Amino acid sequence: MRALTLTAFIIAATPALGLTQDDIDGAAFDGGALPDGQSGLTVKLQVLLDRAGVSPGIIDGYKGGMSESAIRGFEEREGLAVDGVLDADVWSALGGDSAGAVLMDYTVTEDDAANLTESIPDNVAEKAELDALGYTSVSEKLAERFHMDEDFLKALNPDVGFAVGDTITVADVGDRLEAQVARVEVRKSTQRAVTFDADGNQISNYPVAIGSDETPSPEGTVEVTAVAMDPTYSYRPDVNFEADGVKEALTLPPGANGPVGSVWIDLSEPTYGLHGTDTPAALFQNESHGCVRFTNWDVEELAYMVSAGVTVEFIE
């Protein structure tokens, strides 16, 4: 009896295995709702939405708010009934049955392992003392490159150390969009930023974090004034907000793990911008200090499609 009890305890205490490549490659839409929790079908859906220019945020295989909002954005663009639910029309419009593999092999390079930051302190003054606020591991860097949650990337490659020369499995998200954006709508109610060309055609659609009631995002229409890649960050507690009890002005170094991530798109409303984040999985949980926060990869894509004079309209 003791042995049986011990065996039962061991089985109960063993964590469930994560998704495998076979789980994802073999996933198919059968007409039902997306499974709760994590599933191969949701991975496929997220990758196909990403390829279609409607970002699901992080690719992690979990049914959740960011993926639902991306489905809504895709349905709106395609003229389908907008309900945020995967159905046959959405799957067909995404090319689901004929899309092919959504995963691919990638070999870690020396560049992937270069220029890492050993660790990121919590205190803003300590951050200002560093040379860079970059990625702290190869897995973090590659997770962002392939638009994936880092834990999901690791789970998909359980026996890999992410050393130079290792071959890993990653999401095949395709190439970065190339277009000329004329207008951006920041839709506060849905927490999405939608881009349009000069003829009013929708180009891309991204999940964002916006300001809170205490530190709201702008209202009305403003313009892009400049784009800075890999920007430093000016910490000005007398103008913006105070963090960690630090009262003096500081300049924080650039890096994907900095307060504004890898891109700053400056707006004509002083002190406001569109920028990246060091916590992409928390976009829909976090509120910004008034700016509009994207995943680093989404705002990097946007940065190459906008220029000074592009209008940014904030819609309630």
Image: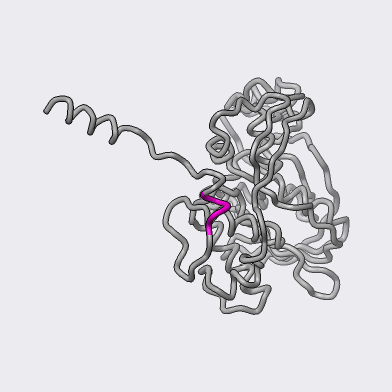
Task: Report the number of numbered marks.
Answer: 0
Task: Judge whether residue 22 is colored magenta.
Answer: no
Residue 165 horizontal/vertical position (percent): 73, 26
Residue 309 can be seen in this image: yes
Q: Residue at x 70, y 62 (%)?
A: 52
Residue 270 percent location from the top left of the image? 76, 50
Please give the name of the residue rendered at 68% of the width and 45% of the height, measured from the top-left corner. 104
- Viewport quadrant of the C terminus: bottom right
Write down the quadrant of residue 208 in the picture.
bottom right
Q: In the image, 87: left or right of 100? A: left
The N terminus - image quarter: top left
Coloring applied to the structure: one colour
Residue 251 appearing in the image: no
Out of 7 and 129, give the one closest to the viewer.
7
> Quick one: 151 or 292, which is closer to the camera?
151
The magenta segment is 23-27
Which residue is more in the foreground, 276 or 289?
Answer: 276
Q: Nearer the viewer, residue 270 or 17?
A: 17
The residue drawn where x is 65% and y is 54% is 101
Provide the major secondary structure of the magenta segment. helix
Vertical relation: 183 (above or below) 5 = below
Location of residue 63 in the rendering, given as x and y in whole percent from the top left corner: 48, 56
Q: Picture coordinates of residue 180 (x, y %)? A: 86, 62
Residue farthest to the left?
A: 1
Q: In this rendering, is residue 193 above or below 263? A: below
